Image: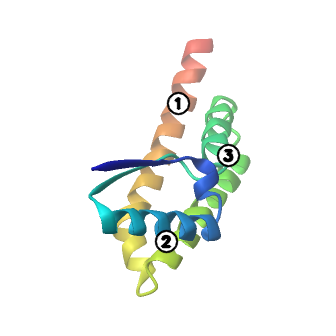
Amino acid sequence: MRVLKFGWTSLKDLEMISRTTEIVLDAKKEEEVIVVVSAMSKVTDKLIELCNLAEKWDTTTITKCLKLLKKKHYDVLKWLYTENPEKVWEENVEKSFEELKYIIKWASFLGSKISD
């Protein structure tokens, strides 16, 4: 069994994701594989930015940041699921973004209570 770990550079765009996929499929031909991936390029930075924005409750910038994250993930999803990506998104990903918005809202609330 082989463990393959891919960092953000391997997931920075669709071309690199495609290359990473080929590596995994080639390795899988020889033996079982476990794949470990980190966040796509710039996603961790955006999540940190969202935490900082939550503290200030900058809703305009929070909304823009969430839209960028959604687009990045949706573009990959469309590439992976050429048939009916909207259904896959609704069933698997949209809930995670709703939970993220909920966490941001509570982080903002708690942050304001801590600083009072």
Inspect this view and state whether residue 93 appears: yes
Residue 5 in picture, x, y percent from top left: 46, 47
Question: Is the residue marked by circle 3 packed among few (<14), some (14-19), or many (20+) residues within 10 Å?
Answer: few
Rendered residue at 32%/69% (across/down): 29
Inspect this view and state whether residue 66 appears: no
Q: Nearer the viewer, mark 3 or mark 2?
A: 2
Which residue was labeled with disc 2? 77
Q: Nearer the viewer, residue 50 or 10?
A: 10
Judged left or right of residue 43, residue 82 is left
Question: Tag 2 or tag 1, which sits nearer the N-term?
Answer: 2
Specify the label residue 59 is tagged with: 3
Q: CA distance from mark 3 to mark 2?
A: 26 Å
Question: Tag 3 or tag 1, which sits nearer the N-term?
Answer: 3
Rendered residue at 59%/55% (across/down): 10
Of helix, strand and loop, which one carries label 3?
Answer: helix
Q: Amino acid at mark 2?
A: Leu
Q: Amino acid at mark 3?
A: Thr
Q: Nearer the viewer, mark 1 or mark 2?
A: 2
Q: CA distance from mark 1 to mark 2?
A: 28 Å
Rendered residue at 57%/31% (across/down): 108
Residue 52, placed above or below residue 10: above
Question: Tag 2 or tag 3, which sits nearer the N-term?
Answer: 3
Rendered residue at 67%/41% (across/down): 45
Considering every residue shown, the one lying at the far bottom of the view is 83
Question: Is the residue marked by circle 1 packed among few (<14), some (14-19), or many (20+) residues within 10 Å?
Answer: some
Which residue was labeled with disc 1? 107
Q: Quadrant of residue 30?
A: bottom left
Of helix, strand and loop, which one carries label 2?
Answer: helix
Q: Nearer the viewer, residue 55 or 40?
A: 40
Q: Quadrant of the C terminus?
A: top right
Q: CA distance from mark 1 to mark 3?
A: 13 Å
